[in-house]
Amino acid sequence: MLAQYRLNLNPLDPSNASSSASALLIRAKENYGFIPNMFSYMANSPGLYATYIEGHDQFRHQSGFSAAEQEVVFLTISVENGCEYCVSAHSMIAEVISKLPTTEINAIRDGAPLTDVKLNELSVFTKNMLLKRGLPSQDDVKHFLAVGYTEQQILEVILAIAVKTISNYTNHLTHTPLDQAFAPHAWQDKNTSL
């Protein structure tokens, strides 16, 4: 989903970004072998870019979720927010790096239940937290905890929502073109009602 209004900001690279954003762009190239288009647009706001990177890294390393579970959370949020760029990118990461089964990736992309009970509950809870604006019901939390997640991980879901809000909204407003690396996993939002 793309915003009706498109920001007139150009993507930046290490040569024309601020020193703090330039350092993050260089780090991205070292980590990924290329600078994802999303980061080139985020670099227009060094605070936004740094906040995204810090939150993303904290979620990846401190959430207590496995790599596959992290992708379930990120994909669920990105699908609900209609972010074609992030759904495509996280689909590739989920399949290639996190080894989430393709059937589970496709279920999230299609808004269908996952076959794995625990992963399905994680997706359902994440969606509820997002759509209910952080006001889960007693039953929402009960079901989440019943499959083995913790109250601390409720806070980690909030962190993931914050991180994905930054990236999803940036992509909506900049109409971020999909990187070639993610193209085989391209996803189009079927609910483009704006």
Image (tube, rainbow, N blue to C red):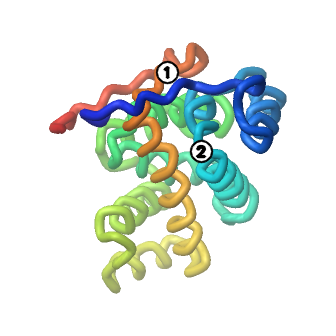
Q: Nearer the viewer, residue 94 or 120?
A: 94
Q: Nearer the viewer, residue 4 or 124?
A: 4
Q: Where is residue 150 drawn, in percent x and y?
A: 58, 77
The residue furthest bottom is 138
- Per the image, the residue denoted by label 1 is 178
Q: In the picture, residue 136 is in which quadrant?
A: bottom left
Q: Where is residue 60 drawn, in percent x and y?
A: 69, 54
Cα separation between marks 1 and 2 = 20 Å
Q: Secondary structure at mark 1?
A: loop
| Residue 66 visible at all | no
Q: In the picture, residue 132 is in which quadrant?
A: bottom left
Question: Type of residue at label 2?
Answer: Ser
Q: Residue at x 64, y 60 (%)?
A: 65
Q: Residue at x 79, y 39 (%)?
A: 19
Q: Residue at x 57, y 25 (%)?
A: 11
Q: Secondary structure at mark 2?
A: loop
Q: Residue at x 51, y 67 (%)?
A: 158
Give the numbered dot on residue 45: 2
Q: Where is residue 70 drawn, in percent x and y?
A: 59, 52
Image position of 129 (left or right of 153): left
